[in-house]
Image: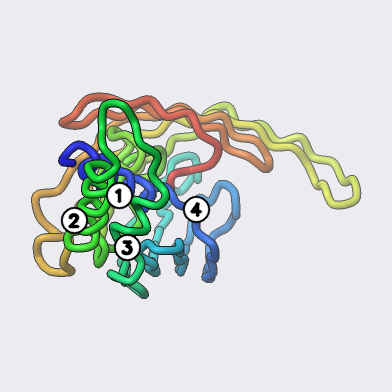
Amino acid sequence: EEEFSKFIKNLLKYYNLTRIFIRRQGFNIDLTDDRIDPRRGIRFKFENYGFEGEGLTNYRVEDYSFTSYIPNKKLDSVLVANIFYSSSTVLNALGEEKLWDKKSCLDQIESTERISNETICNGLIKGFNEFNETEANNSIATTLGGPNRLRSYPISRFYDKYSFFAGLEHRIYFQEVTTPFNFILEKGVYEGIQLAFFHEIGQVSPTNDSSLYKNFKTSTGMGFRLLFTSVVLRADYATGKEGDEITVFIGYGF
């Protein structure tokens, strides 16, 4: 029973983490000089997205991101600063009416040689109950770790009801080449190389208080990027307390 209980509880927790959002909306205020590769200006982004699943916790997430781009006089070096905050709110927690009862379970479970139907059902019901008591009222804000925030940690390494992130990145440009032409909507081709150095901090917390803004996880590293007119190819190396990570991605982290 204990083994089945642990399995069901962890399965529900994992499913909560991996469900695909069903709606996403927001707005982006972009006061920069370029949408793909900005070098001066500011950008503010708000997103609201929700998760739903039959019999599982439904919740809403709100993300706020502010980014500032501060160049040198020649525009061949840019200091980028980003502050990110995410909060989550439970809309509908898993209720007891969603749980299996023992009679329904026994009607659906087939017997096995090693484990009785009653043992299986007791473990399943206990797992659902424990998830309902300890996890069902929890919601998860945008996670930290992965290619965009705290790059020295695996994807979704840190998660809780609230998350906070701040990052600094110094981008240096080399061998920039522009080939001008005028063909319908295309006005030229740009190519360049970029070297970047970055430092990031972040934290997650079940409450929106001082615990969210202390004892930060940190990530430090450098990146090499190939720049084109409409795309940025990024390769980053980051190191932190739990080891190193290499990221190969399209587009900037922030």
Choose mark 3 or mark 4, whichever is in front.
3
10 Å neighbourhood of mark 4: few (<14), some, or many (≥20)? few
Q: Whole-Å distance between the Cαs marked 4 and 1?
A: 14 Å
Q: Mark 4 points at which residue?
A: 20
Q: Quadrant of residue 222?
A: top left
Choose mark 3 or mark 1, whichever is in front.
3
Q: Is mark 2 on a helix, strand or loop?
A: helix
Q: Name the residue under label 1.
A: 13
Residues marked 2 and 4 touching at CB (< 8 Å):
no
Q: Which amino acid does label 1 sit on?
A: Lys
Q: Which amino acid does label 4 sit on?
A: Ile
Q: Which of marks 3 and 1 is nearer the N terminus?
A: 1
Q: Which of marks 2 and 1 is nearer the N terminus?
A: 1
Residues marked 3 and 2 touching at CB (< 8 Å):
no
Q: Whole-Å distance between the Cαs marked 2 and 1?
A: 11 Å
Q: Whole-Å distance between the Cαs marked 2 and 4?
A: 24 Å
Choose mark 4 or mark 1, whichever is in front.
1
Residue 99, label in figure: 3
Q: Which of marks 3 and 4 is nearer the N terminus?
A: 4
Q: Whole-Å distance between the Cαs marked 3 and 2?
A: 11 Å
State how the image is colored. Answer: rainbow
10 Å neighbourhood of mark 3: few (<14), some, or many (≥20)? some
Q: Whole-Å distance between the Cαs marked 3 and 4?
A: 22 Å
Q: Mark 2 points at which residue?
A: 130
Q: What element carries label 3?
A: loop
Say whether residue 157 is left or right of residue 51: left
Q: Earlier in the sequence, mark 4 or mark 1?
A: 1
Choose mark 3 or mark 2, whichever is in front.
3
Q: In this view, does 116 lie above or below 72?
A: above
Q: What residue type is labelled 2?
A: Glu
Q: What residue appears at the point 44 percent right and 41 percent down from the top-left corner?
A: 77
